[in-house]
Amino acid sequence: MRQWTKDLRNTQSAHTLIELLVVVALLVLLVTLISVPGEFLSRMMVRAEVEKLRTACRYLQRRAMAEGKQMTLQFNRHTNSYGCQDEANTLPSQVVFGTLPSAKGPPSSPTRPLTSPITFEGDHITFGPEGAMQAGAVYLADRHKQCLYGLTASVGNMHLRTYCHRTRWHLLD
């Protein structure tokens, strides 16, 4: 009888350990599921802002061509905004003009550490009546500096390119 009681006690403590491991595993799974959507949403918010900026640039480029006059898109790092004349767009509080410490640029040939989130001279993009724009890049990051997107215009090019930086740059378009 004594042996049976001893075995029963060992079996009960083993179940307790297994139950504890299951509970810990479920908690780890829950924390993971909660944090992943947060990172995903942050990344998607930055990407949406890059696309919005790209759309604004395309609009101004076409407007400059249609009106036959130069247009300028001005960036303001201090207010996290950009705009043309009386039209202003402020970035959401989760998105900033910024870079990541590990990122190098420009995205097409990343050789130098990024030191500035806006490389367009004078912190503005000028669109000419023939459709050309000045060369440079704008980098947007999430406020925690975990994801980075870039919008670039190369010398002599009339096209904008968007990039995403994870461990290296990836062309999105």
Image (spheres, helix red, strand yellow):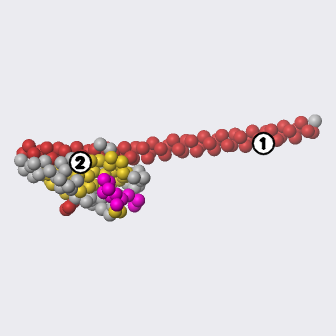
Amino acid identity at mark 2: Leu
Q: In the rendered image, which quarter is residue 80 located in? A: bottom left
User: In the picture provided, is 109 more to the left or to the right than 84?
Assistant: right
Which residues make up the magenta segment? 101-111
Q: In the rendered image, which quarter is residue 81 located in? A: bottom left
- The kind of secondary structure element at disc 1 is helix
| Residue at left offset 23%, top offset 48% | 160
The residue nearer to you, when weighing 116 against 4, is 116
| Number of numbered markers | 2
Residue 83 percent across, percent down from the top left: 19, 52
Location of the C terminus by quadrant is top left
Q: Single out the mark in the foreground, 2 or 1.
A: 2
Main secondary structure type of the part rendered in magenta = loop
Name the residue beneath numbered marker 1: 13
Is residue 94 visible in the rendered image? The answer is no
Location of the N terminus by quadrant is top right
Name the residue beneath numbered marker 2: 160
Residue 112 percent across, percent down from the top left: 34, 62
Residue 172 percent across, percent down from the top left: 32, 44
